[in-house]
Amino acid sequence: MVHSNSNVKEPVKQGMWGIFEVFADTMVVCTMTAVVVLSSGAIDLNTGLAVAGTNDATLVAQAFGNVFGKPGEWFIAIAMVLFAFTTLLGWSHYGSKAVEYLFGLKAVKFYKVFFVLLVVSGALMSSSIAWDISDTFNGMMMIPNLIGVVVLSPVLIKIVRNYVDRKIKGKVVTPVLSFDPEVQKEMEVAVKNGEE
């Protein structure tokens, strides 16, 4: 949803940024965090359990503190504040757009109040319950997303093949910039007029 707000002519180019973000976060940041945690002594490598005095809320901060000292703990504290804040903004945007699509613009005000109440209640509950609830709802979001991916696969394949043919293979073909014929015509005119 966030990438759909961008102002680019090539949907594949924006999609590549989306793929890069997921790769950078999941494969690079999460892997580096796991390496620090596993090499810090905060986890017993024989059992896979946290050592005494470490719990799920303090594991990463303690691990970075063991490896980098106090600056490591401060780094994690600041990073958590920034990541938590930007995650709240992102989820608020996703929810607002979904509610707007399903129930109209007036319902968004109620959603925002509900969202703030959920944020406050999440901050007050224990971290294990908050994570369990978060994991459950994130898992449930996977169902409609996977259905959408499967249904839209033919459109995606068509647009990506067109992009690869034009930009990588150098073929002279008409750009496929939208699945909507009217939007496609508008985009073709914009490209021809150099508004890219």
Image: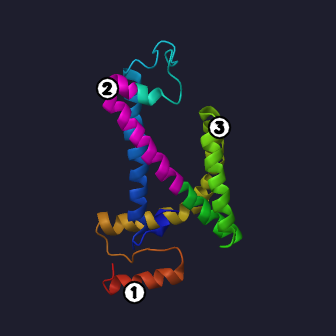
User: Whole-percent x and y of residue 138?
Assistant: 61, 46
Disc 2 is placed on an element classified as: loop
Q: Nearer the viewer, residue 186 or 114?
A: 114
> Within the image, what quadrant is residue 112 found in?
bottom right
Q: What secondary structure is the stretch in magenta mostly built from? A: helix
Residue at position x 47%, y 69% in the image:
5
Residue 165's disc is none
Q: Circle 2 sits on which residue?
A: 69
Disc 3 is placed on an element classified as: loop
* Cα separation between marks 1 and 3: 54 Å
Amino acid on which the number 1 mark rests in the picture: Val
Q: Does residue 144 appear in this view?
A: no
> Within the image, what quadrant is residue 42 found in?
top left
* Cα separation between marks 3 and 2: 29 Å
74 relative to 176, above or below: above
Between marks 1 and 3 in the image, the one whose residue lies nearer the viewer? 3
Q: Circle 3 sits on which residue?
A: 125
Q: Nearer the viewer, residue 86 or 48?
A: 86
Q: Closer to the N terminus: mark 1 or mark 3?
A: 3
User: Whole-percent x and y of residue 77?
Assistant: 42, 37
Residue at position x 48%, y 28% in the image:
58
104 in magenta: no
Q: Give the residue furthest to the top.
A: 46
Q: Is residue 141 left or right of residue 185?
A: right
Q: Circle 1 sits on which residue?
A: 189
Magenta segment boundaries in residue numbering: 63-89
Amino acid on which the number 2 mark rests in the picture: Gly
* Cα separation between marks 1 and 2: 58 Å
Q: Closer to the N terminus: mark 1 or mark 2?
A: 2
